[in-house]
Amino acid sequence: VVVYENFLREFPPDGASSVVSARDERLASVNGYAELLEVGSGMAFGGGILYVHAPDEAEGVSRMILEAFPEFRGRIVPVAQDWLGRQYAVDLVRSSGEQTCCLLFEPGSGEAFEIDCGLPELFDVEFLEDPDTFLGADLYREWAEEHAVPTPPRRCVGFKTPLFLGGHGEVTNLEDSDREVYWSLSGQLRAAVQG
């Protein structure tokens, strides 16, 4: 698939390609969505640095995100997860026609970031030009030197002490985590801090 060839060259798939059984109709008109599913629906890339959600996983992942970020209710469809458990989603409110806006949800920092680009640009440009920001590639390399990278999507590497509670963005503050538990705890702590 030409659309994601730069991404695939830099972050090859970790296994055989999967079959796309369904598409999320909310993203049917989003540029690059159908091609992304063809490239790797339900697959990990680059040694587990990124995982592309299968359409049937989106609802469960949405619930997990919205528990921590309820202000985004009704406006997101998750498309991918990085090794730190951060979620990439399409913003349905800010996307229209050919214009797509993506969001990055970080449980460790308790923040959501708008990424003013579509899916092809996110994967083929942003992930390649700034992998440290968008994929935590610098921490990934450090972590992978001494630890196994957990198998996505059910597991991730999470911050022991969240950044919004004074934790540091260092490998010594990371641990292998169950994704759901990590997100739930981070969401509860975020709500307590904001409350």
Image (spheres, grey):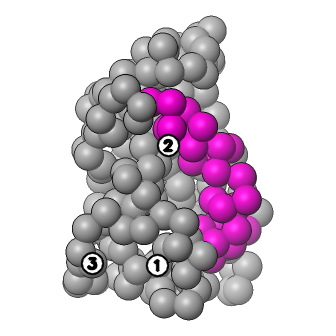
Q: Is residue 66 visible?
A: no
Which residue is located at x 48 percent, y 15 percent? 173
Q: Is residue 145 above or below residue 80?
A: above
Q: Main secondary structure of the magenta part?
A: helix
Picture coordinates of residue 109 (x, y %)? 60, 27
Q: Residue at x 64, y 51 (%)?
A: 131
Spatial CA span between label 2 and label 3? 23 Å
Q: CA distance from mark 3 to mark 1?
A: 12 Å
Sequence order check: which comes first, mark 2 or mark 3? 3
- Circle 3 is placed at which residue position? 17
Q: Is residue 169 visible?
A: yes
> Label 1's element?
helix
In reply to whether residue 139 is colored magenta, the answer given is yes
Give amino acid for label 2. Answer: Arg
Crowd around label 2: few <14 · some 14–19 · many ≥20 (10 Å): many
Q: Which residue is mark 1?
A: 36
Badge 2 is on which residue?
Answer: 86
Q: Quadrant of the C terminus?
A: top right
Q: Nearer the viewer, residue 55 or 14?
A: 14
Question: 103 and 147: which one is in front?
Answer: 147
In this view, 2 is above or below 184: below
Kind of residue indicated by mark 1? Leu
SS state under label 3: loop
Q: Which residues are magenta?
A: 117-143
Label 3 or label 1, whichever lies nearer to me, is 3
On residue 112, the disc is none
**Picture coordinates of residue 163, whole percent (x, y):** 60, 19
